[in-house]
């Protein structure tokens, strides 16, 4: 094994450890649980062309906004996968799982933009998610699974987009209403520091695992 390969493995392991801190994992677990619940309780209207009322946008959005794009993507993917296992509503559709991940990834990336009003960033995120995920990937996945050969994609999209616009509007109200309370009460300005730094337990374990050496100077200071 070359030195470059060893360095790459060491670097990747350390990046993984620094990313998946105890606090980040705890927040991820909470958001995944909330997203799974909202996913399970999605209300489907088959008579309207497989339209559904879902509040899954909310936990995925906030996971991306407050924890970052990668965390948002993880929450979206896991919530859809676990929802399919716990309360399946049909066959597993990979495109919908991908779209669920993007619902968390997109706002996470948009909120990386600095010095812009968060409500503006929220609006941009909602529009992109609606176009790419809701009207795009989700609609394509359902069309290919159930309606291909029965009608054209754009005919199906036309029958679905109106109801989904109402659903995204409801989720938008919830997102705008909850953003500042969550930011102020839970995800304060110290969150990033808390997520990036290991906990005291992790630090103690790491410290105890390393050999300690006392220098002569430290001994002299202690004795004096």
Image (cartoon, helix red, strand yellow):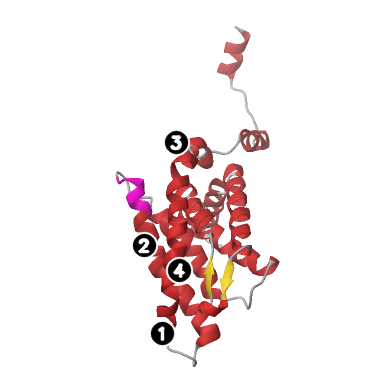
What is the spatial separation of the Cα atoms under label 4 and label 1, in whole angstroms? 15 Å
| Residue holding disc 1 | 155
| Residue holding disc 2 | 127
Q: Which secondary structure, mark 4?
A: helix
Q: Residues within 10 Å of mark 3 (few under 14, many from 20)?
A: few
* Mark with earlier residue (4, 1): 1
The vertical placement of 25 against 204, above or below, is below
Give percent across and percent down for residue 59. Answer: 53, 54
Tell me which residue sits at (50%, 59%) in the image: 57
| Residue holding disc 3 | 189
Q: Residues within 10 Å of mark 1 (few under 14, many from 20)?
A: few
Residue extending farthest to the left is 115
Give percent across and percent down for residue 84. Answer: 64, 69
Residue 164 tag number: 4
Give percent across and percent down for residue 19. Answer: 53, 48
Q: Residues within 10 Å of mark 4 (few under 14, many from 20)?
A: some
Of residues 207 and 161, which is closer to you in this image?
161
Q: Which secondary structure, mark 2?
A: helix
What is the spatial separation of the Cα atoms under label 1 and label 2, in whole angstroms? 21 Å
Q: Which secondary structure, mark 3?
A: loop
* Mark with earlier residue (1, 2): 2
Between disc 1 and disc 2, the foreground one is: 1
Tell me the quarter of the image containing the N terminus.
Answer: bottom right
What is the spatial separation of the Cα atoms under label 3 and label 1, in whole angstroms? 47 Å
């Amino acid at each position: 094994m070359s030195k470059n390969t060893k360095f790459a493995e060491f670097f990747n392991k350390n990046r993984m450890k620094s990313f998946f801190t105890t606090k980040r994992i705890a927040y991820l677990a909470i958001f995944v649980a909330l997203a799974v619940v909202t996913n399970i309780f999605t209300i489907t209207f088959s008579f309207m062309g497989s339209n559904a009322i879902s509040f899954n946008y909310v936990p995925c959005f906030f996971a991306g906004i407050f924890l970052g794009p990668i965390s948002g993507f993880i929450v979206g993917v896991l919530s859809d996968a676990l929802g399919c296992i716990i309360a399946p509503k049909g066959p597993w559709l990979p495109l919908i799982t991908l779209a669920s991940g993007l619902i968390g990834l997109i706002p996470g990336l948009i909120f990386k933009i600095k010095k812009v009003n968060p409500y503006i960033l929220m609006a941009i995120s909602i529009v992109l998610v609606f176009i790419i995920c809701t009207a795009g990937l989700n609609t394509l996945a359902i069309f290919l699974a159930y309606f291909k050969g029965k009608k054209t994609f754009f005919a199906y999209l036309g029958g679905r987009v109106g109801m989904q616009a109402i659903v995204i509007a409801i989720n938008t109200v919830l997102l705008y209403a909850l953003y500042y309370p969550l930011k102020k009460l839970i995800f304060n300005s110290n969150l990033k520091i808390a997520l990036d730094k290991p906990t005291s337990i992790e630090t103690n374990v790491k410290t105890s695992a390393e050999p300690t050496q006392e220098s002569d100077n430290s001994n002299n200071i202690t004795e004096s």
